[in-house]
Amino acid sequence: MCGSDIAAIIGVSKSVVTRFLRTEGLQAPRDLVHKWKGEKIAGRTSADKKEDMYLRRNYLKLPVKTLAANLNRSHTFVSTRLRQLSLEIPPEIILQRKIDSRIKPGTVPPNKGKRMSKSQYKKRVATMFKRGNIPPNTKVRDGIIVTRMDSKGHPYKYIRVSIGKWVQYHRYRWEMFRGEIPPGHCLWFKDGNSLNCKLENLEVITRAENMRRNSIARFPPELQSAIHQLSKLNKKISSWEQKTK
C-alpha cells in the first residue's frame, strides 16, 4: 500500500508514515511507486479517448516530443499520460532514438554561410569574446611556475614562457644553462624527486638507458627471477578465478 492509504487506515498524517518508513529504512520498489502514483491520478486527466488511442497506437513508433507536438500537448503531459496508461517504452527503443537524434558526421549545420541578423547580433554582442580579451583564469605573467600531475600521477613543475605556452621547468632550466638536449636523449632526476629541478640533480641519458632504469633490468638477478615468478602466479590465479565464475 502507498503511504497515503496507510495513513488513512491508521488515522495519522501522510508525513508521519513517510517519516517512519524513512527512519526504519523501508522503501518500496521504484516500479511499484510509479504504479501507485498512476493509480492515484488515473482518473484526474484532461486527456480524451482519441488522445489515449493515439498514444496507444504510436508510443512505440514516435518519440515523446513528436507525440506531444502532434497532439498539441506538452512533453510532461504525454510522459505522465503514458505512465498512467501503463505504457512503458522499452530501453532499447529509447537508446535507438537517442542514437538517431545525434548529429551524424558530415552533416552541414543549417546556419552555415549565413550571417547573423542585426537583431540577433544586438542581443549577443555584450557577451561576445572580444579580440585581445584574456580569460579570467589566465596566469598574470610569464615565468610563473606551477605543479601538474602527468597521466601516471607523477608531479612535474611547469613554467609559463608565453600566454598559453607552458614547458617542463627542469627542461627549461637545463636548456637555458646547458644547451639543448640531444635527439634520442632525456633528462633524469638523480635523487628520484621530479620536483627537484636543480641542475646538479639533473643528468642527460639516452632513452634506451631511461627504459633500462625504469624496467625490471635495474634489479639484481635474484629479484628479477622472483618478480617473474610472481607475475606467472598472478596470471594463474586470475585465469582460475575467471573459470570459476
Image: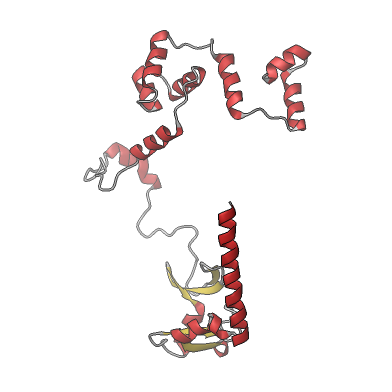
Which one is in front, 199 or 4?
A: 4
**Residue 43's spot in the image, x, y percent?**
54, 10
Confirm whether residue 220 shows in the render: no
**Residue 111's spot in the image, x, y percent?**
25, 41
Q: Where is 131 relative to 121, above or below?
A: below
Considering every residue shown, the one lying at the far left of the view is: 113
Q: Is residue 235 left or right of residue 66?
A: right
**Res 130 quadrant in image:** bottom left
**Residue 88's spot in the image, x, y percent?**
47, 25
Confirm whether residue 41 shows in the render: yes
Q: Is residue 37 left or right of residue 117?
A: right
Identify the residue shown where x is 43% and y is 9%: 48
Q: Where is 234 relative to 65, above or below?
A: below
Q: Where is 37 relative to 230, above or below?
A: above
**Res 157 quadrant in image:** bottom right
**Residue 226's spot in the image, x, y percent?**
62, 79
User: Which image quarter holds the N terminus?
Assistant: top right
Identify the residue shown where x is 66% and y is 27%: 28
The colouring scheme, among rainbow, by chain, secondary structure or one colour, is secondary structure
Please state the total of marks drawn on the protein image: 0
